[in-house]
Image (cartoon, rainbow, N blue to C red):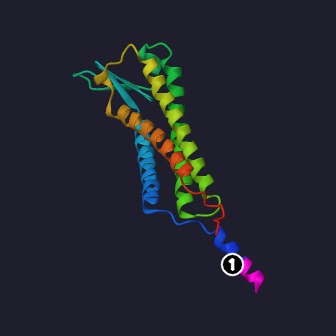
Amino acid sequence: MTAIAVQAQRLLGQRRPRRSFFESFIRTLIIVCAALAVVLSSVSICDGHWLLAEDRLFGLWHFCTTSNQTGPQCLRDLSQAHVPGLAMGMVLVRSGGALAVVAAIFGLELLMVSQVCEDRHTRRKWALGSILLLISFVLSSTGLLGFVILLRSQITLIGFTLMFWCQFTASFLFFLNAISGLHVNSMTHPWDQPRKF
């Protein structure tokens, strides 16, 4: 009888505390915002047209010239833009953006799994997902900064396209969700810690 009572108390001690509505809401909001950031970043990278400077459109994949007579003419060879280092630099910018999306997808996956399949490793999965989002922020912001540095002589504030601002917003959301996720995880009760009676 004593052994049964000890086992029951041990099972009760290992039971996870119930999460408050506010904590569940915050975690859900982080997941939704991270998913939105992944979508924005993916669309921005795939489109790639980030800067319009007079009659020239600079993108991650193409360089276009526009005129009223012939319409836009786009070239894959970015060296034709006659901007020093643009062709090689855009390879790094594209790679950084693409890797940021990949890392964010894996991070988002871990965040979602940690909420759907709760076990003793749930907090670790959430923390790892948040760290991957932070890595996504570093990669995407590095790509943005590289793009701005490469085309610094062509840049005007109104020249940035909607796709550039989508990537900028996604990068900001990666950072915000990563920091929020790590902060929420550090403030909440450890789920694998036995409760005292």
The residue at the far front in this view is 197
Q: How many marks?
A: 1
Kind of residue at badge 1? Ala
Residue 73's x, y, as percent? 34, 25
Name which quarter of the figure residue 123 lies in: bottom right
Q: Would residue 32 be counted in the magenta stretch? A: no
Residue 63 location in percent, x, y? 40, 24
- Give the residue at the far bottom of this rendering: 1
* Residue that mark 1 sits on: 8
**In this image, 102 relative to 65: left or right?**
right
Q: Circle 1 — which element?
A: helix
Q: Residue 168, image x and y in percent? A: 40, 33
In the image, is residue 3 part of the stretch drawn in magenta? yes
Q: Quadrant of the N terminus?
A: bottom right
> For this rendering, which residue is in front, 72 or 102?
102
The image shows residue 13, relative to residue 47, as above or below, that is: below
Q: Where is 84 relative to 195, above or below? A: above
Depth order, front residue of 164/193 = 193
| Front residue of 2 and 169 | 2
Q: Along the line of sight, which residue is nearer the eye, 11 or 116?
A: 11
The image quadrant that residue 54 belongs to is top left
Q: Which residues are magenta?
A: 1-6
- Where residue 189 appears, as percent x and y from the top left, is 57, 57
Q: On the image, which quarter does residue 58 sit in?
A: top left
